[in-house]
Image (cartoon, helix red, strand yellow):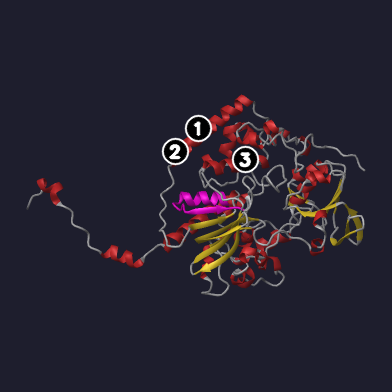
């Protein structure tokens, strides 16, 4: 065995380095934690970059208490200045339980519910199948130490900067601490989202999942299951804020599905990395999730970690380029929030080719994620090494056929991403065949075909499903798809942090539909054409004169 270096000084059930209990997540949420949960990360950084750029020093207890008091007082002022949300203006309808039901209580669902409330739409329910505190990915399956996006991107605050991450973080830790961050530490983001949900008063019904959708004219009758008990609710609007796995699930090669579940896992599922101590671990996929899983396994004491890529090289952020790009980038259409939120206005051909460019390029890995794994001597990378078969030997080890050769491992982790296939979503079982896909609406030029792209739903400007056949299944326009399936229509992986810039547009579209749906043209005509009532002249009678 090669010598292992850089081992974690302490471990958790995820294998990620975290602070001791006194400065853990709960302490952080109270304002007492370290800026990055106490992560020891100096060895992960590029030459010349100090660890202070990754995480600030833990605040002293007295300073933390004072910072928390300041945050509480500041938040009260913000909410007072902002004023109470408008009173609900939607019309009550017989047989309708909620105007909007949102599936997903993570960062997207919470932010969308808040945005609707600020628009005056408050008959909204948010559900999530997870336990309280476990919604979303940040405390469960996310294994990166920093977010993969710039720290200055807009978040769930809907243009109220005082409720944004930066205001929260700087109030607790100071402006210098924010300036010193490279990117946002994952545990800090998780604590911020928990704080945001709390201060905005967004309620989530946990341990509840959407089972089925039954069209009822323009309404939607939803079958929900809570702790094994079924109930039905009727809604006007449904938002699927169900994340990356909400439109088909993890992408798992067929040769892996036949393996016993005890010897493999997809990176999108919880993994107890402690059980991999002393084991030989194989990882398929050289994207960010693969490297994050490798880092977690190594920190948990895995004897050997072998990461396999079918591509001829690894792509990582800020990498020196050996060969120049064949063509300059087009006019700016990426990386700037105001431009990102207009991506759905691009012509279909441009949106399609943007997807092809993202889909065909070699996945990029943040440099710190790569260095987190590479610093271990017992970490091994194989390029041009595609898995084609897998099995189990008599000793229970995983056998993989890789580039024509057979290797054996104790455990297999898939960093193979997600697939889009609406037919695989149980709640869409009775309606998916009516949904328009890109394959129905767009015919690519020869050589630009993509089965994966064609499987994405072709969405309207409000993220709504559209019917495959004209003038059919109009109820689909009341189902808004704010998850990974929207990535071709809107140009980015929807559900991740960068897609928060699209949430105001989604909220506005839902509010507009509800407003127009409540319009009673006949009643409006009677009102508009009715003569004005004549007021009593007593108030001005004394001053009344004749010519």
* N-term-proximal mark, 2 vs 1: 1
Q: Residue tagged by mark 1?
A: 73
- Callout 3–callout 1 Cβ contact below 8 Å: no
Report crowding for label 1: few under 14, some 14 to 19, many 20 or more residues within 10 A (C-alpha).
Answer: few
Q: For the residue labelled by badge 3, is the local secondary structure a helix, a strand or a loop?
A: helix
Q: How many labels does the image show?
A: 3
Query: In the picture provided, is 6 more to the left or to the right than 234?
Result: right
The part of the image, by quadrant, that contains residue 13 is top right
Q: Residue tagged by mark 3?
A: 191
Quarter in which the N terminus is drawn = top right
Query: In the picture provided, is 43 more to the left or to the right than 136?
Result: right
| Residue ID at (81%, 54%) | 262
Report crowding for label 2: few under 14, some 14 to 19, many 20 or more residues within 10 A (C-alpha).
Answer: few
* N-term-proximal mark, 3 vs 2: 2
Report how far apart the C-alphas of labels 3 and 1 lie in the structure.
18 Å
Furthest residue in direction left, as rendered = 547
- Callout 3–callout 2 Cβ contact below 8 Å: no
Work out whether residue 317 or residue 118 is closer to the camera in this orientation and state it.
Answer: 118
Q: For the residue labelled by badge 1, is the local secondary structure a helix, a strand or a loop?
A: helix
Q: Is residue 76 visible?
A: yes
Q: Residue tagged by mark 2?
A: 80
What is the magenta range?
A: 109-128
Q: Is residue 500 visible?
A: no
Residue 326 lies, in percent from the top left, at: 74, 58
């Amino acid at each position: 065995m090669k010598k292992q270096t850089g081992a974690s000084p302490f471990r958790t059930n995820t294998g990620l380095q975290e602070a001791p209990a006194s400065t853990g997540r709960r302490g952080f949420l109270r304002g007492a934690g370290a800026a990055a949960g106490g992560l020891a990360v100096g060895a992960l950084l590029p030459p010349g970059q100090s660890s202070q750029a990754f995480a600030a020093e833990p605040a002293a207890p007295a300073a933390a208490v004072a910072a928390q008091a300041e945050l509480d007082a500041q938040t009260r002022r913000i909410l007072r200045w902002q004023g109470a949300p408008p009173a609900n203006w939607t019309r009550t309808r017989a047989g309708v339980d909620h105007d909007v039901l949102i599936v997903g209580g993570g960062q997207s669902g919470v932010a969308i519910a808040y945005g609707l409330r600020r628009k005056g739409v408050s008959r909204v329910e948010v559900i999530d199948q997870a336990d309280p505190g476990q919604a979303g990915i940040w405390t469960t399956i996310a294994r990166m130490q920093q977010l993969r996006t710039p720290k200055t991107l807009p978040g769930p605050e809907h243009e109220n900067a005082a409720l944004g991450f930066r205001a929260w973080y700087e109030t607790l830790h100071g402006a210098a601490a924010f300036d010193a961050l490279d990117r946002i530490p994952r545990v800090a983001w998780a604590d911020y989202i928990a704080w945001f949900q709390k201060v905005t008063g967004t309620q989530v019904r946990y341990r509840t999942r959407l089972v089925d959708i039954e069209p009822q004219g323009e309404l939607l009758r939803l079958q929900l299951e809570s702790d094994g008990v079924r109930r039905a609710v009727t809604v006007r609007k449904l938002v699927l804020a169900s994340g990356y796995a909400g439109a088909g699930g993890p992408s798992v090669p067929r040769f892996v599905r036949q393996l016993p579940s005890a010897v493999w896992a997809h990176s999108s599922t919880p993994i107890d990395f402690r059980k991999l101590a002393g084991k030989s671990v194989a990882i398929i996929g050289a994207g960010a999730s693969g490297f994050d899983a490798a880092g977690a396994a190594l920190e948990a004491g895995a004897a050997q970690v072998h990461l396999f890529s079918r591509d001829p090289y690894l792509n990582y952020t800020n990498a020196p380029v050996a060969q120049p790009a064949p063509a300059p980038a087009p006019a700016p259409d990426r990386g700037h929030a105001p431009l990102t939120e207009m991506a759905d206005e691009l012509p279909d051909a441009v949106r399609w080719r943007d997807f092809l460019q993202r889909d065909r390029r070699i996945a990029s890995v943040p440099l710190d994620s790569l260095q987190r794994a590479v610093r271990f001597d017992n970490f091994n990378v194989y390029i041009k090494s595609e898995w084609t078969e897998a099995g189990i030997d008599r000793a229970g080890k995983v056998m993989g056929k890789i580039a024509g050769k057979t290797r054996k491992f104790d455990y297999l982790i898939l960093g193979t991403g997600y697939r889009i296939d609406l037919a695989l979503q149980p709640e869409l079982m009775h309606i998916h065949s009516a949904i328009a896909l890109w394959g129905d609406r767009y015919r690519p030029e020869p050589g630009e075909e993509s089965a994966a792209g064609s499987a994405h739903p072709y969405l309207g400007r409000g993220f709504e499903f559209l019917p495959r056949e004209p003038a059919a299944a109009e109820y689909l326009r009341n189902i808004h798809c704010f998850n990974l399936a929207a990535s071709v229509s809107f140009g980015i992986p929807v559900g991740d942090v960068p897609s928060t810039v699209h949430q105001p547009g989604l909220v506005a579209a839902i509010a507009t539909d509800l407003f127009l749906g409540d319009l009673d043209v006949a009643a409006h005509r009677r009102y508009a054409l009715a003569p004005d009532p004549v007021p009593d002249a007593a108030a001005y009678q004394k001053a009344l004169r004749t010519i």
